[in-house]
């Protein structure tokens, strides 16, 4: 399971489509605060989005 570091002020997360066609969760930031989490399918992306709602102050997310 990969571990993703969530910054202290992540902003709002969105599900977008990557170039390969799979869902990708991003917060549309650049630099140090950027978060990109690849997902298997839309159901997996929805599960991760539910987990991310609890990360308002940052932390680590195990996918």
Image (spheres, helix red, strand yellow):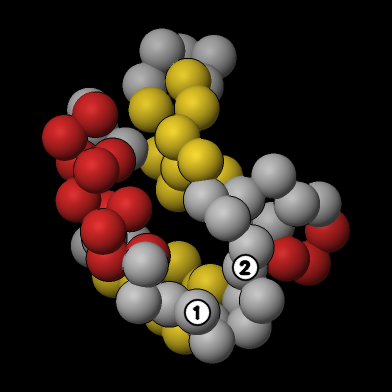
* Left or right position of 52 against 8: left
Q: Quadrant of the C terminus?
A: bottom left
Q: Is residue 29 placed above or below 54 in the rendered structure? A: above
Question: Image quadrant for the N terminus?
Answer: bottom left
Asked whether residue 36 is in view, the answer is no
Q: Which residue appears at 69% of the width and 57% of the height?
A: 34
Number of other residues with Cα within 10 Å of mark 1, as a class: few under 14, some 14 to 19, many 20 or more:
some
- Which badge, 1 or 2, is on the more N-terminal residue? 2
Q: Give the image quarter of residue 48.
A: bottom left
User: Which residue is located at x 19 percent, y 51 percent?
Assistant: 47
Q: Is residue 49 left or right of residue 6?
A: left
Circles 1 and 2: CB distance less than 8 Å? yes
* Left or right of 32 on screen, residue 22: left
Identify the residue under disc 1. Answer: 56
Numbered mark located on residue 13 in the image? none
Residue 57 in the image: above or below residue 17: below
Say left or right for 12 vs 25.
right
Q: Mark 2 points at which residue?
A: 10
Q: Which of 16 and 1 is in front in this view?
A: 16
Q: Distance between the residues labelled 1 and 2?
A: 7 Å
Residue 55 versus residue 17 in the image, above or below: below
Is residue 11 positioned above or below 22 on the image? below
Visible residue check, residue 19: yes
Q: What element carries label 1?
A: loop
Where in the figure is residue 26, as x and y percent of width and height?
A: 56, 45
């Amino acid at each position: 399971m990969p571990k993703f570091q969530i910054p202290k002020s992540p902003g709002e997360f969105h599900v977008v489509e990557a170039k390969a066609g799979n869902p990708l969760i991003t917060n549309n930031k650049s630099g140090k605060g950027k978060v990109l989490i690849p997902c298997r399918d839309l159901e997996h992306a929805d599960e991760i989005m539910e987990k991310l709602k609890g990360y308002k102050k940052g932390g680590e997310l195990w996918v």
